[in-house]
Image (spheres, rainbow, N blue to C red):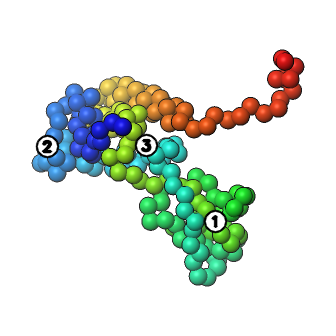
């Protein structure tokens, strides 16, 4: 596995990609550090939740809360503390109807297992995801640090391509979908 990078390492890589000088810390007194400190967490969370990345997925059996929801469902469940986004809800074989309401999951199922995204530390970001974060952060830092709209737009296009590439690499780590019994396939044999 590749060596882990810290938030500062990722910010400095983005600054270098932008053509700016690296900083010593996110709490430095210069403009680059202040802008990077403000944008870094926003860019990372947006990039994390842009796709259901394999390294951000967890499953948890949710705990039912006391009292029924006000409307529509029978049971309220507490969400995990590290919850970012719901991916799939299962009640042991079926996908029940559910809704996320005020930091809770509401459903008619009596027990649910939630597949969800959480916010992992930078030390577990795989190389393909790091590259996407660096590219997106460089694009976001461009306007406040260089005031160049054209350069920011070019960097944003590059960041989108890097994000697509990273997502393709991440998806390739899954079992590929099986080809079903299709009449077109039978004709070819």
- Name which residue lies at 67% across and 35% down: 177
Q: CA distance from mark 1 to mark 3?
A: 27 Å
Q: CA distance from mark 3 to mark 2?
A: 24 Å
Q: Is residue 142 visible?
A: yes
Q: Which residue is mark 2?
A: 24
**SS at mark 2 in the image:** loop
Q: Is residue 6 left or right of residue 76?
A: left
Q: Percent from the top left, x then y, of residue 186?
A: 86, 23
Q: Is residue 130 visible?
A: no
Q: Identify the image quadrant of the C terminus.
A: top right
Q: CA distance from mark 2 to mark 1?
A: 46 Å
- Please tell me which residue lies in front, 136 or 96: 96
Q: Is residue 148 left or right of residue 71?
A: left
Mark 1 vs mark 3: give the one in front: 1
- Name which residue lies at 16% across and 40% down: 23
State whether residue 74 is above or below residue 147.
below
Q: Percent from the top left, x then y, of residue 115?
A: 57, 56
| Circle nearer the N terminus (2, 1) | 2
Mark linked to residue 50 = none
Q: Are marks 2 and 1 in contact (CB under 8 Å)?
A: no
Considering every residue shown, the one lying at the far left of the view is 29
Q: Identify the image quadrant of the N terminus.
A: top left
- Please tell me which residue lies in front, 189 or 134: 189
Q: Percent from the top left, x then y, of residue 59?
A: 55, 58
Q: Percent from the top left, x then y, of residue 31?
A: 17, 43
Crowd band around label 3 with a 10 angstrom C-alpha radius: few (<14), some (14–19), many (20+): some
Q: Which residue is mark 1?
A: 112
**SS at mark 3 in the image:** helix
Q: Which residue is mark 3?
A: 47
State whether residue 91 is above or below residue 77.
above
Mark 2 vs mark 1: give the one in front: 1
């Amino acid at each position: 596995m590749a060596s882990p990078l810290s938030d500062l390492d990722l910010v400095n890589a983005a600054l270098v990609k932008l053509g700016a000088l690296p900083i010593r810390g996110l709490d430095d007194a210069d403009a680059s550090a202040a802008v990077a400190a403000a944008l870094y967490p926003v860019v990372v969370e947006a990039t994390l939740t842009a796709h259901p990345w394999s390294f951000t997925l967890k499953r948890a059996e949710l705990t039912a809360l006391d009292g029924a929801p006000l409307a529509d469902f029978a049971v309220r469940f507490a969400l995990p503390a590290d919850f970012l986004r719901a991916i799939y809800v299962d009640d042991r074989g079926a996908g029940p109807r559910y809704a996320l309401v005020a930091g809770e999951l509401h459903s008619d199922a009596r027990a649910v297992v939630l597949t969800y995204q959480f916010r992992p530390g930078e030390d577990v970001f795989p190389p393909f995801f790091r590259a996407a974060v660096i590219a997106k952060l460089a694009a976001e830092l461009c306007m406040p640090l260089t005031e160049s709209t054209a350069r920011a737009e070019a960097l944003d296009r590059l960041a989108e391509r890097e994000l697509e590439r990273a997502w393709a690499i991440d998806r390739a780590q899954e079992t590929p979908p099986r080809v079903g019994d299709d009449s077109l396939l039978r004709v070819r044999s």
